[in-house]
Image (cartoon, grey):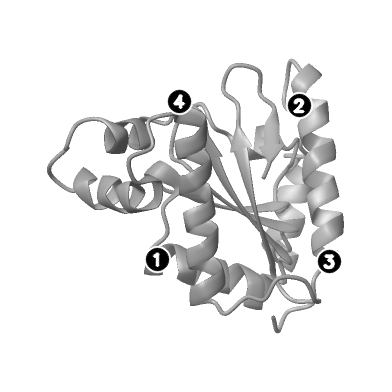
């Protein structure tokens, strides 16, 4: 990483966990979206403390889930939270140029993309997503296990492609599973 991090990966993970705890009891979003912060981040730039790679599912809203505001999270969304060169480039940018110390690959239960990979054989461009998920989950038919296997595969791809070592002071990668029914995040 060339940009200076605003916090360590451990501090970033604690912020995410604390934010999710606040979210579980919230009726409205808590993140700062004020005009003052919009102007400040426009003039001074963004320094997100975490990179979140998650599904495009409309029920999964990372800024809300982690009680984060403008400039706090660098969110990359793609159906099935799969990884390809576009996501890797975005992660690399956020880590190297914005100083983000932590990548969280966050899947969710009842994921349509994972369900499609476990079930039928879709065609079209969706097949690119489901084929990658099928490689990650094999013949798994349990929703929770399949979603976790898919997250772990994306984590592995990030670590291997960006040559990230576990531990140390560099970029850290962890996995998580968002539970649609109650809003909790299970860190893997």
Q: Position of residue 95 (x, y in %)?
A: 65, 71
**Do we see residue 58 in this rendering?**
no
Depth check, front residue: 40 or 99: 99
Q: Which of marks 3 and 4 is nearer the N terminus?
A: 3
Under tag 3, what secondary structure? loop
Q: Which of marks 1 and 3 is nearer the N terminus?
A: 3
The residue tagged 4 is 110
Q: Which of marks 2 and 3 is nearer the N terminus?
A: 3
* Residue found 47% across the figure and 56% down from its top: 153
How dense is the environment of label 4, judged by Cα within 10 Å: few (below 14), some, or many (20 and up)? Answer: some
Q: How far apart are marks 4 and 1 (CA)?
A: 25 Å
Of the numbered discs in the image, which one, if any, rests on residue 6?
A: 3
Under tag 4, what secondary structure? loop
Under tag 1, what secondary structure? helix
* Residue found 69% across the figure and 80% down from its top: 1
Q: How far apart are marks 2 and 3 (CA)?
A: 23 Å
Quadrant hosting residue 84 = bottom left
* Residue found 68% across the figure and 33% down from its top: 185
Q: Earlier in the sequence, mark 4 or mark 1?
A: 1
Q: Are marks 2 and 3 in contact (CB under 8 Å)?
A: no
């Amino acid at each position: 990483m060339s940009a200076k991090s605003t916090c360590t990966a451990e501090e970033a993970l604690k912020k995410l966990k604390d934010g999710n705890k606040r979210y579980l009891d919230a009726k409205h979003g808590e993140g700062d979206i004020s005009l003052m912060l919009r102007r400040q981040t426009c003039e001074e730039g963004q320094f997100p403390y975490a990179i979140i790679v998650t599904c495009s599912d409309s029920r999964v809203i990372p800024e809300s889930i982690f009680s984060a505001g403008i400039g706090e999270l660098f969110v990359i969304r793609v159906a099935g939270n799969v990884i390809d060169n576009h996501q890797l480039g975005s992660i690399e940018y956020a880590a190297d140029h914005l100083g983000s110390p932590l990548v969280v690959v966050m899947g969710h239960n009842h994921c349509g993309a994972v369900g499609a990979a476990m079930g039928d054989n879709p065609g079209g461009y969706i097949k690119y997503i489901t084929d990658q998920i099928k490689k990650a989950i094999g013949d798994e038919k349990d929703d929770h296990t399949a979603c976790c296997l898919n997250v772990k595969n994306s984590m592995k791809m990030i670590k291997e492609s960006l040559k990230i070592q576990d531990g140390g002071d560099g970029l850290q990668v962890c996995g998580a599973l968002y539970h649609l029914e109650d809003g909790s995040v299970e860190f893997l």
